[in-house]
Image: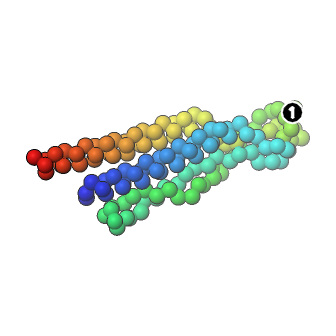
Amino acid sequence: MDFSASLKIAATGLHAQSARMRVIAENLANADSAGKAPGDDPYRRRVPTFQAAYDSAVGGKVVEVGKLAYDMSEFTSRYEPGHPAADATGYVQYPNVNPLIEAADMREAQRTYEANLNVVSVTRQMLGRTLDILRG
């Protein structure tokens, strides 16, 4: 595998983790978004999907971002009888977003992004050293 293949593989990893962080940020931004009227569903948590794909130009597998999936877990309910979206019993449905899980996912995505960034940095250093050797 050559330097450009390493850079391309790391670049696809950077792209995938960047997309993952955007989805997590959207989930966190909508964590308290209830419906507007009784019976309306609130925001449903999204989950990015990834798949490995063989890239013949690279000679190896790269990461591709798939479609966004919806987390089909149950919504949470809170007793808020004065809320416009409250049902007849006074409960309001809220999104199935757990900020603690989102924070953990964000941290994992950040660390994976940093790891791919380190691959790019080390590959550039190795390329520079190779050029120095060839000049000398």
Q: In this figure, what is the number of numbered marks?
A: 1
Q: Position of residue 81 (x, y in %)?
A: 86, 33
Name the quadrant of the N terminus: bottom left
Left-right relation of 31 to 133: right
- On the image, the x and y values in percent for residue 125 come to 25, 43
**Toward the viewer: 124 or 65?**
124
Q: With respect to residue 99, does 129 lie above or below?
A: below
List x then y, in percent, for residue 35: 79, 43
Where is mark 1, residue-wise?
81
Q: Which residue lies furthest to the front in this view?
A: 135
Spot the residue most to the left.
136
Which residue occupies 42% across, 38% down? 111
Mark 1 residue crowding within 10 angstroms, few (<14) / some (14–19) / many (20+) = some
Q: Nearer the viewer, residue 71 or 84?
A: 84
At mark 1, the secondary structure is: loop
- Residue at x 31% of width, y 53% of height: 6
Which amino acid does the dot numbered 1 rest on? Pro
The answer to whether residue 77 is above or below residue 69 is above
On the picture, is 34 further left or further right than 27?
right
Q: Identify the colour scheme used.
A: rainbow
Left or right of 124, for residue 83: right
- Please tell me which residue lies in front, 85 or 72: 85
**Residue at 57% across / 58% down in the picture?**
67
What residue is rendered at 18% in x and 49% in y? 131
